[in-house]
Image (cartoon, rainbow, N blue to C red):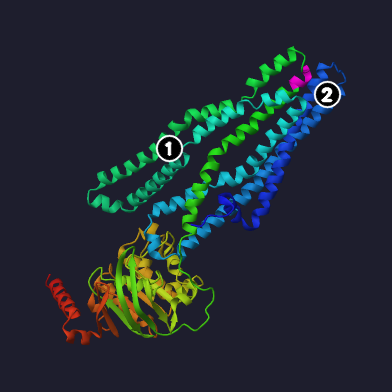
Amino acid sequence: MGKDKNGSFGWLLSQSGERRGKFVASVILAAFSTVCGIVPYYFIARIVRDLLNGVTDKSAYITNCAVILVLWFGHSLFHALSTANSHLATFHTLAVIRKKALDKLAKMPLGDVISQPSGALKSTIVERIDGVEPTLAHILPEFTTGIGAPIIILIYAFVINRKLGLAALITVPLGLVCYALMMFGYEENYGRTVRATKALNAVTTEYINGIEVIKVFGKAQSSYEKFAAAAKESAASFVDWMRKCNVYMTFAMCIMPATMLSVLPIGGIMAMHGTISAADFITVIILTVGLIEPLLSVMSYSDDIAQMDTIVSDVRSILDAPEMVRPEKLTKPADGDIVLENVHFGYADKEILHGISMTIHKGEFAAFVGPSGSGKSTVARLIASLWDAGSGRITLGGTDIKDIPLDEYNDRIAYVSQDNFLFDLTVRENIRLGRQSATDKEVEDAARKCGCHDFIMSLENGYDTVVGTSGGHLSGGERQRIAIARAMLKDADIIILDEATAYTDPENETLIQRSVARLVEGKTLIVIAHRLSTVKNADRLYVIKDGNIEEQGTHDELLAKGGLYSSMWAAHISAKDGEEDV
């Protein structure tokens, strides 16, 4: 990951875009607030001087009190305006970063996304990005001006009496030593909490998503133990860290602001010897009291500042990840045959496809068959541009798909997998995802053509039934049929069905096949099937085994060869006969 030349803070500000002006306004308003918070100490000192000098004119006291009141009101007003501006800009910036992170996931190769636990990604996009909020919303205006307030107060104290000004600084080095001891090993300790939190999120997500398997196979105890171990490690990472630095933090917070410990005795001795007037001594005491709040404020944000690099690094691990590079505009025609030329592909260090070459003509019905794990779905995903080929190339109408804008290519593809994801929306809205502009009538027509209108109408609220998280309120077959309706509504030029009827019963599978056959007329259809009878009428069958094309041809041609497909067909027919006997 390339490090920003301005550091993590500069990178965060670079994400604020048009709202950067609000950050600037926030700092300026915070500066006014600080000035309004400091100047009253001067007027308080004047009141004390007047009292010591025996001034009896009430108007002078009233005037000074009125000025203090106005300044106090100005301090509160400017602080509120500063905070409002910083928060508006901050939450806009967080929204921008989150949107970029989600856009990035869509542009990354699918393998890079699914290789990361969803809980860890959720932790980064939600919790880690939320961790930036104190830095931008509070530290930027309050920390920068909080540094200025003590400096101004100390300068004024030095003007009154240099020795007392130095006395006010005596506790600062001691506080800094405690602070340094507190921060010792910070990066390692904070890194442990980040890793533990990610692991807990990942295990929690896995536990919830796998609850059905856990119950069915009696793994509740072992799965809970895994979750409990992650929860204990998460708690321990914070407890151990706090235990290491709690004493130093307490001393730092107590010693550094305790300027009176040195100012009072030293100033008292000086006043006794007549080297400082009582009025000046009291004025310095009042000013020193004004040091405490800004020093405590600055120290309270030290933890957020220390975490900032880790948080930004975590977020940028997503934003700076390699993505599938595509142009913004299509520069040459891309419509026609799909051609794979010596395509190699692998996960990590293991190659899955070993030089796949094939031509799928426009409007052709092509089918991929073969043993499980042979690479059929991988080929389909490469054609759908969910991944980039490791070497070789894939073309559409002679144009490399890498030269086609991703959004435009996605418009040409309708992809239905075996494990279809439905959003926690209504049935109608899940189907409408295929084409957002579709009317209710067009949605229902697509459902009718795919044979799922009747079962949808049998649901509690028909098309307005909410399907639940991941479509959990529906059966596997029902989810698949809705996913196929969604793909058909998209009306794409290329349709890829990756074992899309795996959960469908034979009766509905036949209905869906007939519907699909009508809907894909003139379109390119690619089907991955485990039931060979569903693809026997394909224009061309590709038999894939161990990442290679073992055979290709029509159903009759492959049977005549007597190779792998012939043996697979014989096994399929035997299994069907067995089912009929039962």
Above or below: residue 113 compared with residue 529:
above
| Residue 238 image label | 1
Q: Position of residue 433 (x, y in %)?
A: 46, 68
Query: What amino acid does circle 2 point to?
Result: Tyr
Q: Distance between the residues labelled 2 and 1?
A: 52 Å
Q: In which quarter of the image is residue 95?
A: bottom right
Query: Of the residues tagged 2 and 1, which is closer to the observer?
Result: 1
Q: Quick check: marks 2 and 1 in contact, CB under 8 Å? A: no
Residue 491 visible somewhere in the drawing: no
Q: Which of 25 and 268 is in front in this view?
A: 268
Residue tagged by mark 2?
Answer: 61
Horizontal side of residue 510 vs 6, given as left or right? left
Residue 218 as seen in the image, left or right of residue 522: left
Q: Which residues lie in the magenta part?
A: 276-282
Q: Tell me the amino acid under the disc marked 1.
A: Phe
Task: Name the image quarter holding the C terminus.
Answer: bottom left
Can residue 132 be seen at all in this image of the molecule? Answer: yes
Q: Is residue 545 above or below residue 106?
A: below
Q: Position of residue 4 (x, y in %)?
A: 56, 55
Give the percent coordinates (x, y) of residue 257. 61, 27
At 38% from the left and 69% from the top, the residue drawn is: 483
Q: Residues within 10 Å of mark 2 (few under 14, many from 20)?
A: some
**Which of the 4 quarters of the picture holds residue 530?**
bottom left
In this view, the residue in front, 83 or 308, is 308
